[in-house]
Amino acid sequence: MKALQYVTIGQPPEVREVPTPQPGPGAVRLRVTAAGACHSDSFVMGLSDQEYADFGYPLPMTLGHEAVGVVDALGEGALGVEIGDAVAVYGPQGCGRCHSCAQGAENYCSHAAALGIVPPGLGRDGAMAEYMIVPDPRLLLPLGGLDPSATVSLTDAGLTPYHAIKGSLELLVPGSVAVVIGVGGLGHVAVQLLRTLTSATVIALDISASKLDFAREVGAHHAFLSDDQAAARVAEAVGPGTVAAVFDFVTNEPVLQIVRSLSGPRTDLVLVGAGAVQTTVGLLGQPFGSRIRAPYWGSRPELMEVLELARTGQLAVEIERFTLDQAPEAYRKLHDGELRGRAVVVP
């Protein structure tokens, strides 16, 4: 079968012929109907030799942690799905037995790292292929008639902002203000979710004028450039009160300064982007009652809820489709910031 694999550190991924995988005991094989490209993949492929060695991901590795497909083969003892079922794959897989996993929050499994359990495409072969293996049927959710290519990005680009926003819902009351920084693949979904789940005034910030137009299209009440005047523009638009929550889908030091300039008492600072920053915390180091969170992906029940929002027409992801042979170009466009939303590969 064909697969898009990361083969050499620092080099673009390659479409290669690889053996068709067979499901082991308890596992499921899917015929992939759509796979999503993500900045996490681009981040991993941008690591140096030493940084990549610290991650320990084996190469070559088939990319793709956003996946939907049709059940094609069952390993011995695999129960709960049938051949021909159309399903979405829950990516942040855990041990399935700890307290977090029992609640469906496998994204916070306390044993996954020690057990060597990693998401597809981020440590083991993923979805950018004609077929993929899913280790347990519990990780599969029914698509329920949803279009595969329109749905696949919801497994990360929908689930991640949904999980981030749910953690701040208690603050996003009528009259509150929510700010989204970075209106890309996740940020444009966050704007929609904030409009659907809350009555907050939604403000989008980005460095690109075209992304600001995009933010307005998907529901932002206001959209401004993310520069050192951002806080002043927000205050001019909505008044001088406290911003209830800032959702940062970039997460670097310059953006952190904007985040801090928007924060006040009880502001949630939600750092979602795949970056790292340094900041002062503590009673005298941040506004009273404010919280800094770094949410990761989301739970299986939350993915069910995200798919339901899509079924009822309340959520959609802007996508650009590519064939498997065109997948390297999808990642180039992702890396160069040429995508309006998400890239979807249809094998």
Image (cartoon, rainbow, N blue to C red):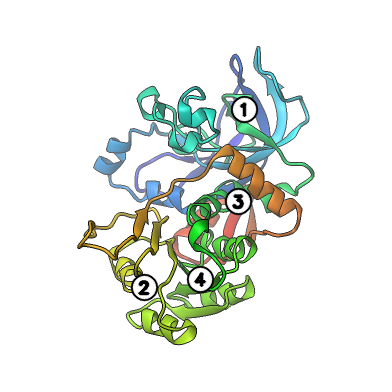
Q: Position of residue 105 (x, y in %)?
A: 51, 36
Q: Which residue is mark 4?
A: 176
Depicted 20 relative to depicted 105: above or below: above
Q: Is residue 36 left or right of residue 118?
A: right
In terms of image quadrants, where is residue 213?
bottom right
In the image, which is nearer the foreground, mark 3 or mark 4?
A: 4
Local crowd size for mark 1, using a 10 Å CA cut-off: few (<14), some (14–19), many (≥20): some
User: Pointers 1 and 3 in contact (CB under 8 A)?
Assistant: no
Residue at which label 2 appears: 262
Q: Residues within 10 Å of mark 2 (few under 14, many from 20)?
A: many
Residue linked to disc 1: 138
Instruction: Point out the image quarter for the N terminus.
Output: top right
Which mark is first along the chain, 4 or 3?
Answer: 3
User: Residue 221's x, y, as percent?
Assistant: 57, 77
Q: Closer to the N terminus: mark 4 or mark 1?
A: 1
Callout 4, which amino acid?
Ser
Q: Secondary structure at mark 3?
A: helix
Check disc 3 and give the amino acid type.
Ser
Say which label, 2 or 3, has the lower sequence index: 3
Q: CA distance from mark 4 to mark 2?
A: 13 Å
Mark 4 → mark 1, Cα distance in angstroms: 38 Å
Q: Secondary structure at mark 1?
A: helix
In this picture, residue 200 sits left or right of residue 347: left
Residue 207: give x, y in percent of width and height. Answer: 42, 75
Q: What residue type is disc 1 on?
A: Arg
Judge depth for marks 2 and 3 and give the one in front.
2
Q: CA distance from mark 2 to mark 1?
A: 41 Å
Q: Which numbered disc covers residue 153?
A: 3
